[in-house]
Amino acid sequence: MKAGEKKMKMWCVSPLLSLFVLHLEANSGLKVRITQRGLNYGKEVGMKILQQEIKEKGFPDRNGTQTFLFGTVDYRVSRIQITSISIHNTSVVLVPENRIVVAVRDASARVSTHWTLNNWLLDYHGKAEISILGISVTATINMSQNNRGYLLMLVPDCRMSIGGIKVQLSGRGSWYYDMFFQYLEKTIQRKLQNRVCLSIKFRIQKMAAALKKLQATSQIDSFAQIDYSLTKPPEVFRSYIELDFKASVYPIRNHTELLFMTVPFSLPDNNDNMMYFGISEYFLKSLSLSYYTVGASKIHFSEEHSSSFNLTTEALSRIIPEIAQHYTESHLVRTSVVVTAAPTVWLQNNSLTVKIPCFVEVSALLLNQTMQPIFALNISAITNATVAITEQRLIGSLQLKRLQLSLTYSNIGSFQVSFLKNLLACFLHNTVILPINDVLKRGFHLPNMARIAFLGPAIKLNQGYILITTDVSYKY
Ligand SMILES: *[C@@H]1O[C@H](CO)[C@@H](O)[C@H](O)[C@H]1NC(C)=O
Ligand SMILES: *[C@@H]1O[C@H](CO)[C@@H](O)[C@H](O)[C@H]1NC(C)=O
Ligand SMILES: *[C@@H]1O[C@H](CO)[C@@H](O)[C@H](O)[C@H]1NC(C)=O
Ligand SMILES: *[C@@H]1O[C@H](CO)[C@@H](O)[C@H](O)[C@H]1NC(C)=O
Ligand SMILES: *[C@@H]1O[C@H](CO)[C@@H](O)[C@H](O)[C@H]1NC(C)=O
Ligand SMILES: *[C@@H]1O[C@H](CO)[C@@H](O)[C@H](O)[C@H]1NC(C)=O
Ligand SMILES: *[C@@H]1O[C@H](CO)[C@@H](O)[C@H](O)[C@H]1NC(C)=O
Ligand SMILES: *[C@@H]1O[C@H](CO)[C@@H](O)[C@H](O)[C@H]1NC(C)=O
Ligand SMILES: *[C@@H]1O[C@H](CO)[C@@H](O)[C@H](O)[C@H]1NC(C)=O
């Protein structure tokens, strides 16, 4: 093989290689980052919920028969009620690659209960106040994804230790109470341990289920749906967690993979807010493509609409004198527009540009009701989009900035196309931009849990993605 040939081969192979690499890096339409600050807030909320839950659920009565040194007694502990819990020292620590460790240190709780002890010899009952001190809990949450791209959160490890239990009895006391309560202490310790860890697991499960539901319910409206599967397992870094969602929009009942790729992006290294959302060009492109697929023919200009302009060949000949040469009598003019391809979208620093390719045909309505085409144009309507956040929805609106015109055919010879710009801008605004804005005004829900509201969200257009930074607040 000659050197030149070899070089040639390399030239052919390297684009293939780069294609391959591109495919390994899956498109991500939405990145969500939860920072340490966000997790700290989440932890505070979680502790309050957990505390409430443990308190409300209480414990079931316990009874049984226990053999002590002095003999066998039947006991019953009832109306076990946690009267207070005090938690002051908690932490949430991120452990790369996929773990979060939540810890509670030196918490305490007070429990009140009624008790009875009896056998053939004795029959006592009373109340007890139990203080549980030095409670420490450490729960490890493992983040991963299942094969359908749903977020999984498991609690592989939950440990609890208790520094000490103090029992204050009311009722008549005797030496065997001590023995009984030593037994009781162990039981309470075991029970509490199970209860707290079960509650934590239950909470995490519930949260994971809610997230799963969020990922699965993806319908935007009667035309389109979003695929919110994860493109890679959740990533845990030292100071934040990042989730990469596909966030690809599909026409409803047509979940076909999109063939285009977009440049991967990363969120800025700023972790002051609780949450960061990055919405990429990929999302916007898939949105454009699917709405084009389902609604392309819908942006067909209706005849009635056209007549509201009451454009005539006579009026039009004031802009294009060539018309007068072909139409001596005045005829009504009908204009039709078709969007010919999915609008293209690109995001740059501080601007989101949407280019809508249109085909516009201008015809004269003859006296015998026949439409006679006068000329047709290919038009690129270039718009500037404004985006905003309201109530966890991303909303948008397009403003027409300029038109690129090219004459497709003309039955009146060549003429100065640019004279039509103002007229066409007005026409396209009413026929194409307004209907699109109606869709964008309804907006798109950002994935978020119930009861969580954005607090002071800010939006910024960056190269390749829309950045939303926000704090959150939980509605109890
Ligand atoms: C515990 O109490 C229940 C009803 O309150 C009773 O059916 C059961 O026999 C008791 N068990 C013992 C071991 O005393
Ligand atoms: C919380 O617990 C940790 C570990 O035991 C300890 O270092 C820290 O001082 C405690 N903080 C407070 C406010 O008690
Ligand atoms: C945590 O998740 C990872 C990834 O799914 C898994 O490989 C690992 O075994 C899990 N660890 C535990 C302790 O469950
Ligand atoms: C499904 O969607 C893709 C891309 O959005 C489109 O190219 C294709 O024509 C659609 N198929 C049907 C049956 O609508
Ligand atoms: C358009 O012309 C029709 C008659 O041809 C008239 O009834 C209608 O009011 C006119 N509309 C406008 C908006 O001028
Ligand atoms: C966009 O802004 C970022 C950060 O401000 C900057 O690094 C980047 O070079 C800018 N890109 C362009 C194309 O101006
Ligand atoms: C309508 O009139 C035009 C021009 O006068 C003529 O070319 C066309 O054939 C007519 N169409 C019908 C359906 O009569
Ligand atoms: C596009 O819109 C944004 C936001 O409204 C604005 O800041 C920017 O100047 C506009 N760009 C152009 C080219 O009009
Ligand atoms: C007009 O657009 C169509 C695609 O919609 C394209 O095939 C055609 O070449 C364009 N014509 C001109 C003159 O730009």
Image (cartoon, helix red, strand yellow):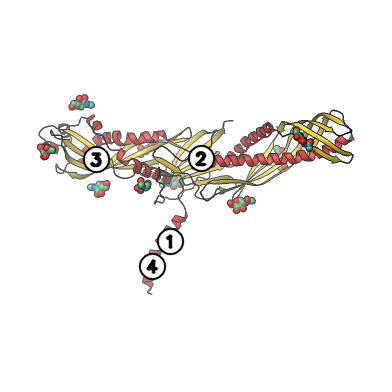
Percent across and percent down for residue 225 are 43, 41
Which tag is nearer the camera, tag 4 or tag 3? 3
Tag 1 residue: 17
Instruction: Name the residue located 69 percent from the left edge and 35 percent from the top edge.
Output: 88
* Mark 1 or mark 4, earlier in chain: 4
Residue 409 visible (yes or no): yes
Left or right: residue 202 compared with residue 371: right
The answer as to whether callout 2 falls within 8 Å of ligand 3 is: no
Q: Quadrant of residue 197?
A: top right
Tag 3 residue: 360
Q: Label 2's element? A: helix
Tag 2 residue: 214
The amino acid type, in three-letter code, at marker 1 is Leu
Tag 4 residue: 9
The amino acid type, in three-letter code, at marker 2 is Leu
The amino acid type, in three-letter code, at marker 4 is Lys
